[in-house]
Amino acid sequence: MSSLDSLGGSALGGTLYGIGVGPGDARYLTLRAAALVKAVDVVAYFAKRGRRGNARRIVESLMAPGRAELCFEYPVTDEVPADSADYRDQIGAFYRETSDALARLLREGKSVGLLAEGDPFFYGSFMHMWCRLESDFPVEVVPGVTGMSGCWTRANLPITWGDDTLAVLPGTLDEQQLVDRLRRTDAAVIMKVGRNLGKVRRAVEAAGLLPRAVYVERGTMENERVLPLADCHDATGAYFAMVLIPGQGRRI
Ligand SMILES: C[S@@+](CC[C@H](N)C(=O)[O-])C[C@H]1O[C@@H](n2cnc3c(N)ncnc32)[C@H](O)[C@@H]1O
C-alpha cells in the first residue's frame, strides 16, 4: 500500500488536486498535502510575473530534483484595479489559457497538483480553475491551514470567545464599507491589506478599534512582523499582511 493509499488516496491519473499548502511555514502542511506534492505527475502554481511564487517556496523541501512543474504567471496583479475592465479582460484571458493548459494535461492522464496558499477555497485563484474544470475532470480539494489561522497563532491572539461574531473583510472594500462592517462585528480579520494599509488604518480608527488591532506581515514565514496596528506607520503593507481584531466575548 502506497503512502497515498493509506491516506485515503485513489488513482491519481487525470485528477486535478487543489492542494492547500498552509500559511507559509512548511511544517503546517497537512499529511495529505505533503503526500500529494511528492506524488503528482506535475506540480503547478500561480506566481507574480518574474517571481518564484510563495506556494512553490513553501513546498521547496518536498520537491525532488527533476520534478515536472508548471508556473502560471499572472499578467497583472495589484497594479491594475480589480474592478476595472482591463483587469477583468487580462485575468479572464489568463484563466482561460491556464485552465486549457491544465485540461490538456488531465486529458493525457496526468495528475496535476495545483498549489494554493492557505486553503484553496478561501480567496484562492485555484477556485477559478475549479469552476472551469470540475464538471469535466475528477478534482480533489485538500484543505489547508488558512493564512489568518497562522497569523492569529503567531500573534498569540485568541480571535473569538463565547458568542463573538467574526467578520472577514477584504481591505479592498471602500473606507466607509469597512467602517460600517467593523462597527457591526465583535472580531475581525482584514485581508489584502497591502496597498490598502492607510485606508484600513483610518477605518479601524474610525470604528474605535485601533487599540485592539494587530498588524501581521508574512505570518509564519521568514521576516514575519507582528505589531500593534497603532505602531505600524508604513505607507503600504506587504502583500502577505493582514489586520486582526480579537473579540472580547465571554471568558470564564
Ligand atoms: C488571495 S488571499 C489568499 C488567502 C489564502 N487562500 C488563505 O487561505 O489564507 C491573499 C491574502 O491572504 C492574506 N494572507 C495569507 N497568508 C498570509 C500570511 N501568512 N501572513 C499574512 N497575510 C496572509 C493576506 O492578506 C493576502 O493579501
Image (spheres, rainbow, N blue to C red):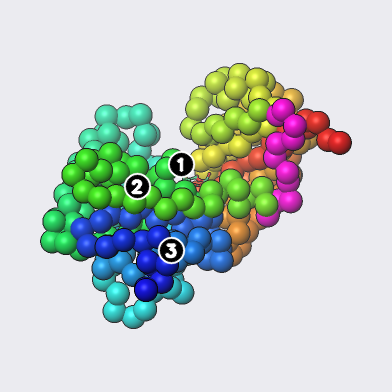
Identify the residue shown where x is 43% and y is 63%. 7
Name the amino acid, label 1.
Phe
Is the distance from the Cβ of mark 1 to the nearest ligand 1 atom less than 8 Å?
A: yes
Whether residue 46 is visible, yes or no, is no
CA–CA distance between discs 3 and 1? Answer: 23 Å
Q: Residues within 10 Å of mark 2 (few under 14, many from 20)?
A: many
Residue 46 lies in quadrant: bottom left
Residue placed under numbered mark 2 in the picture: 126
SS class of the residue under badge 3?
loop
Range of the magenta residues? 154-164
Name the amino acid, label 2.
Phe
In the picture, the disc for residue 36 is: none
Q: Main secondary structure of the magenta part?
A: loop
- In the picture shown, does residue 168 fall above or below 34? above
Residue, disc 1: 122
**Quarter occupied by the C terminus:** top right
| Residue 157 left/right relative to 147 | right
Q: Which amino acid type is shown beneath numbered disc 3?
A: Leu
Where is 176 relative to 198, above or below?
above
The answer to if 161 sits in the magenta stretch is yes
Q: Can you tell which of label 2 and label 3 is closer to the viewer?
A: 3
| Residue 55 point in image, percent of width and height | 43, 59
Query: Is residue 130 visible in this depiction of the protein?
Result: yes
Q: Quadrant of the N terminus?
A: bottom left
What SS does tag 2 mark?
A: helix
Residue picked out by circle 3: 7
Q: Is residue 50 left or right of residue 95?
A: right
Per the model, the C-alpha gap separating discs 2 and 3 is 22 Å
